[in-house]
Image (cartoon, rainbow, N blue to C red):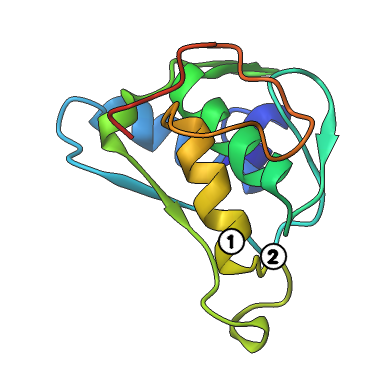
Amino acid sequence: MQGGQSAFGGIWGGYLPIIEALRDSLDLLQVQLYNSGTMYGIDKNISAQGTADFIIAMTEAVIQGFSTSGGMFSGLPSNKVAVGLPSCMNAAGGGYVDVDTVKSSIDHLMSNGTQPGTYVLSNSNGYPAL
């Protein structure tokens, strides 16, 4: 989904128009944070999958929204966002993260813990409703 920062529609941003159209009907959107390689965050820096920075940056992008070459993705309320990660190294082509990194990343996103990587949240209060 965050790969859609390159296009609104098409192969990378194909879900963005659908999510925008269904935003009021969605209860929860679980975003896949694996099998993607490196990606840009809304801070314009690149994060690598399998890191705390990737979890935090990609999750915040879904919440804050981002502009694309074809339109704006408005973001979703944090209480409608879930994080999807592989459960073991063999469960995906890449992006596995150990439990401690996942916990510290989610804690930081929810404003319950210290910053585990270098990514700086654009909302310094975090997202307690995540």
Q: What label does residue 100 carry, if any?
A: 1
In this picture, is 57 found above or below 28? above
Q: In the image, residue 20 lies at what x, y percent?
A: 36, 26
Q: Is residue 13 left or right of residue 126?
A: right
Q: Amino acid at mark 2?
A: Gly
Q: Where residue 68 sits: x, y (%)? A: 65, 19
| Structural crowding at the residue carrying mark 2, measured as other residues with C-alpha within 10 Å and reported as few (<14), some (14–19) or many (≥20) | many
Whole-angstrom CA distance, mark 1 to mark 2, is 14 Å
Label 1 crowd bin: few (<14), some (14–19), many (20+), radius 10 Å: few
Q: Identify the residue shown where x is 35% and y is 25%.
A: 76
Quarter-wise, where is residue 88 in the image?
bottom right
Q: Is residue 73 left or right of residue 12?
A: left
Secondary element at tag 1: helix
Quadrant for the C terminus, please: top left
Q: Which badge, 1 or 2, comes first in the chain's sequence?
A: 2
Q: Which residue shows up at 79% across the image and 31% down it?
A: 118
* Residue 22 % position (x, y): 24, 32
